[in-house]
Amino acid sequence: MPAFLSPGVSYVFSSIAPKLVTPPALILILNQLHNNQKLIPFSIPASLTIPPAPQWLLTPSALIASSVAGSLVIVFGKALWQTLWQRYEMWKLNAVPIPVVKSKWPGGLDVLAELLEGLENDYAAQYIEDLTVENGYLYSLSILGEEFVSSVKRDSGRNQLTVVPDQIVTFNPDDIKRILATDFQIWEKGEAWHVPMNSVLGSGVFNSDGEMWKFHRNMTRPFFSRERIADFEIFRRHSDHAVQLVKQRCSKGEAIDLQDIAGRLTMDSATEFLFGRSVDSMSSPLPLPGRPADERKDTENTFVRAFIAALGVCAFRINVGDTWPLWELKGDASRPHMKVVYEYLNPIIDEAINKKKANPGEEEENTLLGHLVAATNDRGIIRDELMNILIAGRDTTAHAITAIFYFLATEKRSIFDRLRQEVLDVVGPENPLPSFEQVREMKYLRAVIHETLRLMPSVPANMRLARQSSVWVAADGTRYYVPKGITASWSTIGLHRRSDLWGPDALIFDPDRWLDERHKKYYLANPFIFLPFHGGPRICLGQQFAINEASFFVIRLLQAFDDIQFSPESFPPDSLPPAEWREKGRMRKPVEKVQPKMHLTMFLKGGLWVRMREAQAVTQV
């Protein structure tokens, strides 16, 4: 489709219009052939003479009716053929279908409505977690898919409605291990991910498969060497700035939004690490306590605001599914935001490319941009890769830092005191540049980070597309059929909270589970129960960078402050959990002090407002 058409118009012309136009067009063509049989350049046997179309069938109302009826025939015919083929494959593989969640409305529209409602108003990934109550840890969904009456007899002796599922959802570590590792070659991101993400991520490492993915991964991997990710100077500069901002606000007795600070810190660090220059988002005014969320947008610089908005568009597309273009009939919703992003990035990239051309013997690889320019002059490839790594370097780490301080502010005081004491014992109260070796020595800090990522992983869910049919064998020996072309989604947050995998205290924040016998009993026995950075060949390249940055900032903030208090009165209106969460909520809802949400990554609705007390023993930072 031409690039100037909106995603919605393109979708209508490519997916909907052909189904609607084909039946009436066929009627009109056959009628014209009947009226002009003598003009046909070859003879037709009398038995094959084209009969005249009834006049009533040529009326506008009849043609419209044929369009609708014909479209239904095409849709149900495709579904019937797909089901027959899948039944044949199931028989051949000696497998059974994965149970389908029953929907009340045609096309699973009620399920879609619940998903979108949950995305906006419920706990992150709560709806798919709730479905496990009736459907177990492995089920399938049919959202805006095809349904039809099957001819297969059931136990009742009557024909039953059969649904062709279009998505598998699993909370099982063995299933996720197949997708990410053991059956890696038959699973890909696929069109369900590529198409909605393309306008933002392009062909970057997170939005490509096959040889293109290998190209981007091999081009980027060398930059994340131990020497580079252990160079903490960038972390020091931006952490010092962040600590000063917290001091300025808290010294007045006011609360500060640590989620906002974490987002600025990671954006500034990531852009300097990637581009060689920071967007300096921490220089923009900080949000004020209790102000509506809409007012806070004015405190963000233009690039950051556009970057976040573009990610929000992508998240909506992914959650809606294949029909997301219908919500963008007027135009590509990401285009105005990406225009701002490109206006910032393009001059930086062009400057680096021109510098390389002017000085071919001098290669500058202190930044990822310099490293990429040394490998290619293609601005599009470089820009796509920078955007992909920026998302990973900013959003995921920002949430990890936010969640760490959420637990420190709301859980037992002894956790905060123990962690701060470890910081003082290993690093000291004033050392402005903790070393890589010191960070590695801090076992309790690592346990706090792991426990945070267990209960609130930065990426709470993910998905892949099956390139070929396969069989998943369950623990009880059941052979489940996984058809080619189906999307498999898994809930990382649900996996991390299963009591049968983590013990009866799975919903409790307890860093000691990473230090005592539970570590060996649960995690070491099956490492695929903990996947904050995923696993297999596509495991996150920057995971150590993220852990180092989060560790560094936690150390610097705990050096400077000896107390942290959750400040619910400082949150924007309607951002704290509703009362029904405490009264009848499932999982962690009854104990949560904030509303965890998700777009592509997790975040806390309204931020994380806390009050902190400066440690008097620290005289300089």
Image (spheres, grey):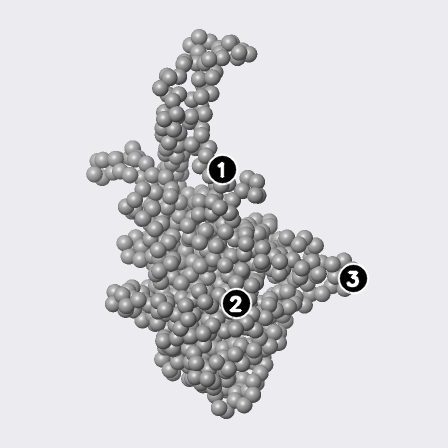
Residue 274: which quarter of the image?
A: bottom right
Q: Position of residue 208 (x, y in %)?
A: 55, 51
Write down the quadrant of residue 584 in the picture.
bottom left
Q: Which residue is mark 1?
A: 14
**Quadrant containing the C terminus in the rendered view:** bottom right
Mark drawn on residue 359 = 3
Q: Is residue 443 visible?
A: no
Q: Position of residue 377 (x, y in %)?
A: 70, 54
**Number of numbered discs overlaid on the protein picture:** 3
For disc 1, the neighbor class at 10 Å (few under 14, some 14 to 19, many from 20) is few
Residue positioned most to the bottom: 617
Residue located 42% across and 22% down the image: 27
Taking depth in this image into account, of 585 and 54 the one nearest to the observer is 54
Q: Residues within 10 Å of mark 3 (few under 14, many from 20)?
A: few
Circle nearer the viewer, 1 or 3: 1
Q: Is residue 440 left or right of residue 19?
A: right
Q: Amino acid at mark 1?
A: Ser
- Residue type pointed to by label 2: Glu
Are the residues tagged 2 and 1 within 8 Å (C-beta)? no
Residue 13 x %, y %: 49, 37
107 to the left or right of 276: left
In depth, the one of 400 and 138 nearer the eye is 400
Label located before the other in sequence (1 or 3): 1
The secondary element bearing badge 1 is classed as helix
Which image quadrant: the N terminus?
top right
Residue 530 position (above or below residue 380): below
At 36% from the left edge and 48% from the top edge, which residue is drawn?
141
Q: Secondary structure at mark 2?
A: loop
Quarter of image, res 367: bottom right
Q: Which residue is mark 2?
A: 300
